Image (cartoon, grey):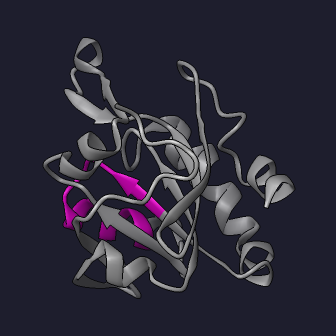
Amino acid sequence: MTIEANDTFPAHTLRLIVDGELQEVESAEYLAGKKLMLVGVPGAFTPTCHASHLPGYIEHLASFEAKGYSVNFISVNDPFVMMAWSEASAATGINMIADGNGDLTNALGLVMDASGFGLGKRCMRFAMAIEDGVVKSIDVEEGGALDVSSAESQLAKI
């Protein structure tokens, strides 16, 4: 079942890259009392994710922060890939969540089968606004689109 608005975010150990350091924290602790924009992407360094999706959030990071939101990206990649992607993209201020085994992506019901492209099971492209551990909105992209989960689209909603 896919997570929906008004659902509580699932309990999970998050593996985060924050300011270049790997941290592990329970989702309930990480989300408590905070507003987050969680952006799911099929893969670090993949063409749309790297050239279009992440750059929009980097460009508009101050606008999200002005609205009280931190920006967090999640992908079915290991922490070292997520760290390298953050560094290569100069994504300072954006937290990267490594979901190497796809466990959290699966718990969210947002698994995409990209086996036809040689990528295996991946995370769907989405954007989710979370407040104090409760999903306020979720927008999942169709196919290879980058419309409803873009930084500009999400800023207009929150």
Q: Is residue 94 left or right of residue 24?
A: right
- Which residue shows up at 24% across the image and 55% down it? 99
User: Where 132 sits versus 120, above or below?
Assistant: below
Is residue 47 shown above or below 98?
A: above
In magenta segment, residue 85? yes
What is the quadrant of the N terminus in the image?
top left
Q: Where is residue 50? Give x, y as percent.
A: 51, 48
Q: Which quadrant of the structure image shows residue 79?
A: bottom left
What is the magenta segment's predominant secondary structure?
A: helix
Residue at far top of view: 116
Figure check: 76 above or below 8? above
Of all residues shown, which one is farthest toward the right? Answer: 156
Tell me if residue 2 is in the magenta stretch.
no
- Residue at x 26% of width, y 60% of height: 81
76 horizontally vs 96: left or right: left
Give the mark count: 0
**Residue occupying image coordinates x 43% and y 59%:** 8
Q: Position of residue 132 (x, y in %)?
A: 53, 76
Residue 82 in which image quadrant = bottom left
Q: What segment carries the magenta color?
A: 73-87
